[in-house]
């Protein structure tokens, strides 16, 4: 399987847009921590044509640390959306169900963050689906079906994956 740079840029741009929508949830709960914002910015730069560099990985790891350091579940999910956005540029061209988590993860985590903050996960998913460029759907279809768990995150994963594949 091959993944073209243009496909990765489209996926990363969509992932960054999903994560950016919930960034205010993180920033309102965890003051003065710019790590998720930096991860989203790095993803946006790559999506706009910048080279894929170590900065993306470093920003993703920093946002993951931020997610783990907060006890606020909504803030943690929002930071994990940022992790997924920066990591999307490094989606592996392996025919593995595990890779599907990397495709739907940013939107999935954004939806969870909204829900945990008292909003609607469904509304966030519908927004994400409405914004997904054709390349995201085409990239997802290259992979075998994902294997989400039985948790709320798994429910969100199933909803996103099914809709992006055109199963619903």
Image (cartoon, rainbow, N blue to C red):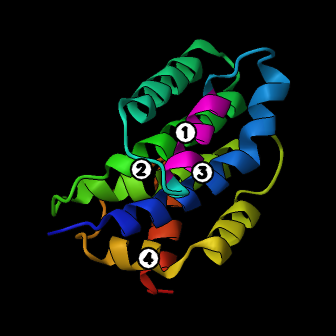
Marks 2/3 in contact by CB < 8 Å: the verdict is yes
Marks 2/1 in contact by CB < 8 Å: the verdict is no
Q: Nearer the viewer, residue 125 or 158?
A: 125
**Which residue was labeled with disc 3?**
16
SS label for mark 3: helix
Marks 3/1 in contact by CB < 8 Å: the verdict is no
Point out the tag, 4 or 3, that comes first from the N-terminus: 3
SS label for mark 1: helix
- Is residue 26 at least partly visible in the picture? yes
The answer to if 14 sits in the magenta stretch is: no
**Which residue was labeled with disc 4?**
135
For the stretch drawn in magenta, the main secondary structure is: helix
Q: CA distance from mark 3 to mark 1?
A: 9 Å
Q: Nearer the viewer, mark 4 or mark 1?
A: 1
SS label for mark 4: helix
Marks 4/3 in contact by CB < 8 Å: the verdict is no
Point out the tag, 2 or 3, that comes first from the N-terminus: 3
Q: CA distance from mark 4 to mark 1?
A: 20 Å
Quarter of the picture holding the N terminus: bottom left
Q: CA distance from mark 2 to mark 1?
A: 11 Å
SS label for mark 2: helix
Q: Residue at x 67, y 32 (%)?
A: 37
Q: Residue at x 41, y 42 (%)?
A: 87
Point out the tag, 4 or 1, that comes first from the N-terminus: 1
Q: CA distance from mark 2 to mark 3?
A: 9 Å
**Which residue was labeled with disc 2?**
88
Q: CA distance from mark 2 to mark 4?
A: 13 Å
Q: Identify the mark at residue 42; answer none if there is no mark.
A: 1
Give percent across and percent down for residue 95. Answer: 15, 63
């Amino acid at each position: 399987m091959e993944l073209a740079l243009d496909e990765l840029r489209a996926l990363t741009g969509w992932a960054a847009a999903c994560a950016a929508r919930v960034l205010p949830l993180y920033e309102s709960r965890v003051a003065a921590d710019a790590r998720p914002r930096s991860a989203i910015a790095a993803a946006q730069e790559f999506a706009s044509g910048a080279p894929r560099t170590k900065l993306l990985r470093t920003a993703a790891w920093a946002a993951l640390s931020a997610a783990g350091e907060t006890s606020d579940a909504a803030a943690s999910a929002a930071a994990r959306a940022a992790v997924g956005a920066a990591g999307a540029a490094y989606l592996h061209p392996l025919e593995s169900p595990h890779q599907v988590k990397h495709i739907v993860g940013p939107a999935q985590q954004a939806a969870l963050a909204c829900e945990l903050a008292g909003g609607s996960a469904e509304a966030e998913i519908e927004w994400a689906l409405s914004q997904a460029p054709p390349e995201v759907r085409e990239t997802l279809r290259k992979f075998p079906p994902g294997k989400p768990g039985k948790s709320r995150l798994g429910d969100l994963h199933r909803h996103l994956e099914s809709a992006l594949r055109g199963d619903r």
